[in-house]
Image (cartoon, rainbow, N blue to C red):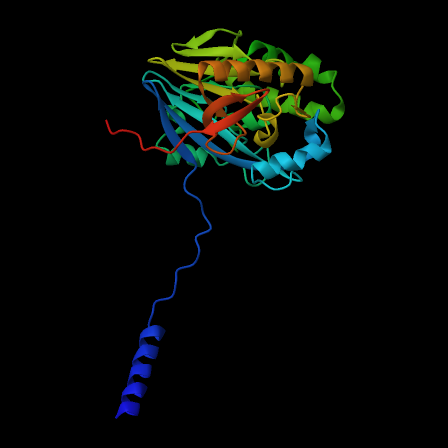
């Protein structure tokens, strides 16, 4: 009887184990790429467009041997491949829905062009946006102004670009003076911005200009001739969309003196970064960075000649 009980128990166990449901497959998908925070009465939504990978030889003003330790410190590899996020920021002021930069659309390769889907996931439609602020006229910041079929992606929006960038990137004379391999970038800029120029929906601004109530353009020239950061202020709180004041967070927070091959004027870009970093840290402004890992929002803490980025902690927004 004892042996019989053991056999029965073994059969029952085997049946129970065999009847366990199979695990579902791994999902291999991330949550929708948007994140919200509040700045006074303004609601800021970070929008993820994707990422691209570049080589460390784009870093200028740093010894090759100094790069791997900085990446190791950030736990992001050895620096042989640099992963740059592409972020944009949507700000609801209560009176306006303002998009800072528009992502890459079809201008770049796979892994990018996700901003339109994430805008919808965040609860907004392209037609809801009434103002688009472009930090500078590089394709990963403005190509999203145009749809795949060549129409305005934001049909109800007015587009704003610094007058220095407009004079440079939209000039046929400037383009003609460039090497042939650089001319397509100028052609593309004229094509995309031209969609809004043709409809009277394109404007330029001067540094220091208040574009809308609570929104001021701050010069950060160097990366491009008119590269601009946009300061949003509400109820004593501030948020600064810094554009491409930096690209490689592992390196350029610790070493603000390091330039990038993407910079039109590397010396001016470094000077602009140092000046803006000092202002951000001193004023304790919250920042949103285009190429810092998503959502790219946080604060800067000064540490000697270096800076430390302190990411914004996740927090649900209060219900209203």
Residue at screen point 42% across, 29% down: 312
Judge from the rendering whether residue 4 lies leftward or rightward of residue 65; answer left or right. Answer: left
Residue at screen point 35% across, 13% down: 236
Is residue 278 visible in the rendered structure shown here?
yes
In the picture shown, does residue 184 fall above or below 159?
below
Q: Nearer the viewer, residue 299 or 93?
A: 299
Residue at screen point 36% across, 17% down: 96
Residue at screen point 31% across, 18% down: 41
Is residue 199 visible in the rendered structure shown here?
no
In the picture shown, does residue 73 fall above or below 38?
below
Q: Nearer the viewer, residue 109 or 303?
A: 303
Please state the horizontal and vertical placement of residue 115, each as a whole percent of the image: 47, 33
Please state the horizontal and vertical placement of residue 110, each as a whole percent of the image: 57, 41
Please state the horizontal and vertical placement of residue 169, each as a whole percent of the image: 63, 17
Residue 82 in which image quadrant: top right
Judge from the rendering whether residue 85 lies leftward or rightward of residue 268; answer left or right. Answer: left
Please state the horizontal and vertical placement of residue 291, each as a whole percent of the image: 54, 29
- Residue extending furthest toward the front: 304
Residue 20 in which image quadrant: bottom left
Which quarter of the figure is the N terminus placed in?
Answer: bottom left
């Amino acid at each position: 009887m004892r042996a019989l009980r053991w056999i029965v128990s073994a059969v029952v166990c085997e049946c129970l184990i065999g009847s366990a449901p199979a695990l579902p497959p791994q999902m291999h998908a991330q949550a929708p790429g948007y994140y919200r925070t509040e700045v006074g009465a303004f609601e800021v939504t970070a929008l993820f467009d994707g990422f691209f990978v570049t080589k460390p030889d784009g870093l200028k003003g740093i010894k090759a041997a100094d790069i791997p330790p900085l990446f190791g410190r950030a736990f992001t590899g050895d620096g042989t491949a640099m992963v740059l996020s592409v972020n944009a920021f949507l700000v609801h002021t209560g009176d306006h829905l303002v998009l800072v930069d528009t992502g890459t659309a079809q201008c770049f390769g796979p892994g990018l062009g996700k901003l339109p889907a994430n805008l919808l996931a965040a609860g907004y439609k392209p037609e809801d946006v009434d103002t688009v602020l472009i930090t500078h006229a590089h394709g990963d910041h403005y190509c999203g102004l145009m749809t795949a079929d060549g129409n305005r992606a934001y049909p109800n929006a007015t587009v704003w670009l610094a007058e220095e960038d407009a004079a440079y990137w939209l000039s046929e004379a400037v383009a003609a003076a460039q090497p042939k391999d650089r001319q397509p970038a100028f052609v593309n800029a004229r094509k995309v911005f031209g969609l809004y120029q043709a409809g009277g929906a394109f404007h330029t601004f001067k540094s220091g200009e208040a574009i809308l109530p609570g929104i001021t353009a701050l010069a950060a020239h160097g990366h491009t001739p008119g590269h601009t950061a946009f300061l949003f202020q509400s109820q004593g709180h501030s948020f600064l969309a810094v554009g491409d004041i930096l690209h490689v967070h592992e390196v350029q927070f610790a070493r603000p003196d390091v330039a990038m091959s993407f910079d039109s004027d590397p010396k001016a870009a470094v000077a602009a970064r140092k000046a803006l970093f000092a202002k951000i840290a001193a004023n304790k402004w919250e920042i949103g960075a285009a190429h810092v890992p998503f959502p790219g929002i946080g604060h800067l803490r000064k540490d000697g000649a270096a800076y430390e980025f302190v990411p914004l902690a996740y927090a649900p927004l209060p219900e209203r």
